[in-house]
Image (cartoon, rainbow, N blue to C red):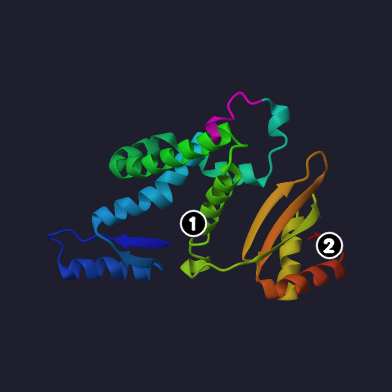
Amino acid sequence: MPWVVCPGPESSAAAVQTARSLATDLGAVVSQFTADEHDEAVALVSHLPQIMSSLLASRLQGTPLHALSLAGNGLRDTTRIAASDPTLWVQILGGNAGKVVEILYGVREDLNRLIGTLEEPLAPGARLDLAQLISEGNAGQARIPGKHGGPPQAYSWLTVLVDDRPGQIAQLLTEIGEIGVNVEDLRLDHSSGQNVGMVELSVLPNKHDHLIEALNDRGWRVLQ
């Protein structure tokens, strides 16, 4: 977990070192920012995701259930934090409103640009502009630090079908451990209308084919 130490004008060197030592003893990754740098950083990497998730989830109010039945991991991933406590976020957003609103101005510009393009999707350059918007997202996503705060790293994904009954996911992970492959990330989903679950796993690319072969040999149903 990251900790940020933000010394004030009257903070002594000893106090700063005590705070850093406490964080280190608790297993945290310690950074030192000014208070203004901290507020600007969390506005982007913490507060904006909450706002965007909540705004997206709010569009689901009143949506027919037959439409929501088509939802997959994309919608679940992007709305997960929309379930956060409103009371807590009223305080957080109110306390950092200045930094948050500066970022929202930029988001508004991007939305206006996208709306303008989609209003005339066949206009010259429209498809190029859409591709550029998506590519800009690719570039930003690629800059998010990887596991344990290290540099970004590409992983390979595979999907394993499991029976929707107790113990199946635990058994799958146990056998992956026996195979000797480390799971970098895991997502769960269900196949619509079927009594089967889908476990999406990410592994290092050089372990991908080996894991698929080993799981198939053990009788698991693997989708590539």
The residue singled out by tag 2 in the image is: 220
**Would you say residue 197 is visible in this rendering?**
yes
User: Where is residue 167 shown, x and y percent of the image?
Assistant: 75, 56
Question: Which mark is on residue 82?
Answer: none
Front-most of residues 107 and 90: 107
Q: Is residue 84 visible?
A: no
Considering the numbered disc 1 on the image, is that residue within a helix, a strand or a loop? helix
Q: Which residue is mark 1?
A: 140
- The answer to whether 190 is drawn above or below residue 10 in the figure is above
What residue is shown at x 73% (from left), y 57% (from top)?
Answer: 169
| Residue at the image position 72 percent from the left and 67 percent from the top | 174
Name the spot of residue 126 as percent of width and height, x first.
57, 42
- Residue lying furthest front: 124
Mark 2, residues whose alpha carbon is within 10 Å: few (<14), some, or many (≥20)? Answer: some
Which segment is the magenta one?
Answer: 56-63
Query: Could you tell me which quadrant the C terminus lies in?
Result: bottom right
Q: Quadrant of the N terminus?
A: bottom left
The reply, left or right, for residue 119 in relation to residue 190 is: left
Task: Please state if 16 lies on the left or on the right of 56 as rendered.
Answer: left
Q: In this picture, is 117 found above or below 209?
A: above
Magenta span: chief secondary structure: loop
